Amino acid sequence: MTTRIFLSISLVFTIAANVFSAVGTAPNLGAAGSFAVLAGTTVTNIGDTQVVGDVGVSPGTAIEGLTSGMVVGTIYAGGAVPAQAQANALAAYNDLVGQACDTVLSGQDLGGLTLTPGVYCFSGSAQLTGTLTLNALGDPNAVFIFKIGSTLTTASNSSVLLINSANSCNVFFQVGSSTTLGTDSAFYGNILARASITLNSRARLNGRALALDGAVTMDTNSITNVCALGTTSASVSISGRVLNTAGRGVRDVKVWMTDSQGIQRTVITNSLGYYAFEDVEAGDLYILGAVSKRYRFEPRSVSATDNVSNFDFLALE
């Protein structure tokens, strides 16, 4: 009788461990890890896009509308480096394909959901309308994987929110065909799409856009691969001024700053339009923006490896 009791208890703990352990593991991106944008055919851009991370295309060689002044990183128009990155991206894509599902979400909109670490699957297309919240439950190494059979589409002004130590570096979207990020959307995670990736006007991506067979198309976007930057424990400051179209400082403007984990801080400009964020963790990548009832400002990204000053916002016409 005693033996049977111990066997039963052992079986219960084994089943419990299997039920409550997330099966997702982050794939090895290899040479693709340094890329913010990687395409198979072409990289195309219009507008004032900003990219932090390498940009490359292979086996194609065409990169249009993106200059070195828009990229904090190296641009590769064909050659051995993006070819190796594509080979490693394909291996990572296949790794994601092979991982077992924790939860099937087919037919559900990602918007409005709060998800914990695991592997989430869609047999066909997936949509995001509103906000998807990813809760890491206090584990900075928690992994979120989304396996999508065909397309991934996000609506205008949609967003991914990372909470409780969630890290965009550990969020992966494996997309069976193409991905489209909607106008003014804010997306966190690594997109590995079999075909193309399109970022509509002013869409922001904190992560990587890796298109295996197709193009990456951009339009006045901010794409930041914070995962390749590394971090230190030092603190720095980010400061600047908010200016109107005439170049005069604007008071009482809310300036916001979002880090790689989706944590946002805000400050208000003083009477001369100056703002400052103190005790900023060095080595991270930040997105900043300014909000005013009277003026419109474009969000900007900055890698804070040292103190950053004169990070100004000029109102658009």
Image (cartoon, helix red, strand yellow):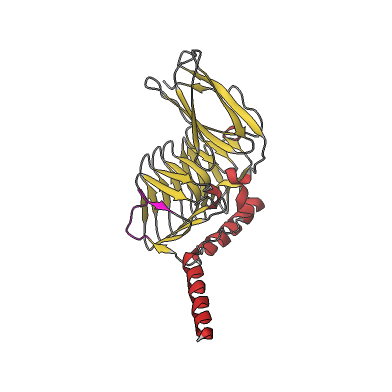
Question: Relative to residue 143, is residue 72 depicted above or below?
Answer: above
- Give the farthest residue toward the left: 107
* Residue displayed at 40% across by 59% down: 150
Residue plotted at (39% across, 39% down): 183
Q: Which residues are magenta?
A: 105-115
The foreground one among 259 and 203 is: 259
- Tell me where residue 204 appears, x and y as whole percent: 47, 39
Question: Viewer-proximal residue, 74 or 191?
Answer: 191
Task: Tell me if residue 66 can be seen.
Answer: no
Horizontal and vertical percent for residue 175? 45, 57
Q: From this viewpoint, is residue 11 visible?
A: yes
Predominant secondary structure, magenta span:
loop
272 left or right of 281 in image: left
As drawn, 300 above or below 209: above
Q: Is residue 306 above or below residue 26?
A: above
For the image, the number of numbered tags is 0
- Asked whether 40 or 194 is in front, the reply is 194
Q: Would residue 2 be found to the left or right of residue 228 on screen?
A: left
Which image quadrant: the C terminus?
top left
Is residue 84 inside the magenta stretch?
no
User: Is residue 106 located in the magenta-colored stretch of the structure?
Assistant: yes
Residue 263, image x and y in percent? 50, 39
Residue at far bottom of view = 1
- State the image coordinates of residue 50 (x, y, percent, origin top left): 53, 35
